[in-house]
Amino acid sequence: MLDIKRKTPFIALVGAMALMASAPAFAQDAAAPAAATAEAQPATDAAAAPAADAAAAAPAPEAAPAEEAAAPAAHSLTPIGMFMQAGVVVKVVMIGLVLASVFSWVLLLTKIFEFAALNKQSDKFLEAFRGARSIADIARISSSEEFEGNPMADMAAAASQEVELSRQAGLAVAGEHRDSTLSRATYAINAVQSSLAKRLSGGMVFLASVGSGGPFIGLFGTVYGIMTSFIGIANTNTTNLAVVAPGIAEALLATGIGLFAAIPAVIFYNYFQTRISAYGTRSEGFVAELMNAISRQLDKGA
């Protein structure tokens, strides 16, 4: 019994040493599965990555056509491009307004040259008229080819011819019949003045119509174009502004063209109204001068 007690520490010591010697092996055996698991994990991740990439890339060919179908068609946002892509009604409105604008500018140039020539010819006629010494001289000067078509020359010719016609009819044109002769001459002048007003106001109605109606015609094209764009929104079931923005821009171009046509037309109308009024005032002054000259010649018996 005593020998067993003495040998027990020795046995315990030997067991401890054996356990310590076998511990690394156990540790290696325990670590081996963990290491194997750790080494297998990157391989699994590496193998899973291409599969994931392939899975992500696989739907792409199917989704691409849908995206291309949903993408809006390319639009040219230049004025010519927007005109070409606009609807038929909007195009008709734009073409009409552009033609109206062109006619307005042509009318501007025509009437500018007309008034310049008219005033120049009138100045020459007044110089020649004031050198007349008799009613016959007035008739000869006003009937000259140099002043053909001049309103003042036509007035002088009408008044002098009326006096001559009265004489040829055997009517007394002087003395107590002087006033009736002047009255007939005045009526002849008034007839020429009526044609003068019609001649000078040629094209003014067109300018007034373009100036007042151009913006509203353009606005009609804009409203129609915007209605078409919103109908397109309803048909495509999309709220993407990029789908309808080009159509709205094309519609607004109609209003821009309407203003482009109307603003110059209004300016030209006011300008020519001023020129017509100025020439009308000048012609009224000439009528007074003409009647005074005829009255003097009648008093002289010429």
Image (cartoon, rainbow, N blue to C red):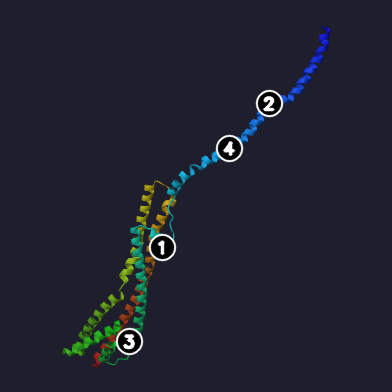
> Residues at badges 1 and 2 in contact (C-beta under 8 Å)?
no
* Distance from Cα at disc 1 to Cα at disc 3: 51 Å
| Kind of residue sitting beneath label 4 | Ala
| Kind of residue sitting beneath label 1 | Ile
Q: Percent x, y for residue 174? A: 21, 90
Q: Which residue is mark 4?
A: 47
* Distance from Cα at disc 3 to Cα at disc 4: 107 Å
Neighbourhood count class around disc 4 (C-alpha, 10 Å): few under 14, some 14–19, many 20 upward: few
> Residues at badges 4 and 1 in contact (C-beta under 8 Å)?
no
Q: Residue at x 19, y 88 (%)?
A: 165
Q: Nearer the viewer, residue 59 or 192?
A: 59
| Kind of residue sitting beneath label 2 | Ala
Q: Nearer the viewer, residue 63 or 250?
A: 63
Q: Secondary structure at mark 1?
A: helix
* Distance from Cα at disc 3 to Cα at disc 2: 129 Å
> Between disc 1 and disc 3, whose residue precedes?
1
Q: Which residue is mark 1?
A: 80
**Disc sitting over residue 30 in the figure:** 2
* Distance from Cα at disc 4 to Cα at disc 1: 57 Å
* Distance from Cα at disc 1 to Cα at disc 2: 81 Å
Please determine whether, in this image, residue 138 is positioned above or below residue 102: below
* Distance from Cα at disc 2 to Cα at disc 4: 26 Å
> Between disc 4 and disc 1, whose residue precedes?
4
